Image (cartoon, grey):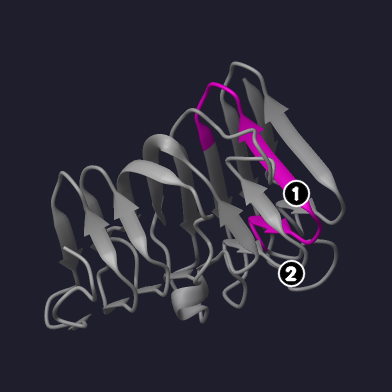
Amino acid sequence: SDVCSSDLTPSGIYMPGTLTISSGSGAITMQGTGGHSNSGPGGGWGLIWDGPTKIYSASGPITLTGSAGSNALPAIQARNSTQYIGWDGGSNVTSGNITIQGQTPSSSTEGALGIDLAHAQIKGNGDNLTIGSYGTGLSGITLANGVLAAGSSWNTITVGDTKTGTVVSNQALAASSDINVTSQGATQVNAAVTSTGGNVTLTAGAGQPVSPTSVPNGS
């Protein structure tokens, strides 16, 4: 397996340039813990990609974990260029589960951008996708339209959990089994959610809205 980790101040794992991380038959794990600064390379992000990146394994799971050290920064951010997660942008696609988890301070001002994958393209090959919190919790998750690459196939999809502040999904979600979208605050789903052989569950915190109340064009 390949493991990258950082507990350094002021940054977690900062990837500014062209980078390929691949494994032929093992797991890939990246875990970054940001410091308390908003400046310097990487600042207080847990994981941040600034350049073209490819992360994929021929046979093995991928786990990406980031903890923000600053309340004004995401735990994980894919910004600039394109970051391919689970594939190389071509024919090589990961055979294994993909897990992306973030932690933000309780005073975080990032809201739904606690995990910001605006420039990522994630591709699966019939396995499970999980995007959520770990540790003390996450301010929120935003899934931009296009974050799941065309041609992806998933067994299950889980976005958020009971320690995720809010979830906004502008990405169509499709899986052969269960799909769960959960937050402890508001849950907003703006694109189709379709399971061909499982349950679709949208959950918000007590007294918080699930919007829309019916899944658009899904089942």
* 73 relative to 207, above or below: above
Which of the two discs, 2 and 1, labels the residue nearer the N terminus?
Answer: 2
Residue under the point 74% across and 73% down: 38
Residue at the far top: name it.
Answer: 25
Pick the residue in front: 204 or 194. Answer: 194
| Residue 37's disc number | 2
- On the question of residue 182 being in view, the answer is no
| Residue 53's disc number | 1
**Magenta part of the chain:** 45-62
* 91 relative to 191, above or below: above
* 3 relative to 173, above or below: above
Quarter assignment of residue 19:
top right
Q: Quadrant of the N terminus?
A: top right
Residue under the point 61% across and 78% down: 72
Expressed as whole percent of the image width and height from the top left, the position of residue 180 reads 23, 56
Tag 2: amino acid: Ser
Q: Is residue 24 left or right of residue 167?
A: right
Q: Is residue 62 left or right of residue 111?
A: right
Expressed as whole percent of the image width and height from the top left, the position of residue 169 reads 38, 72
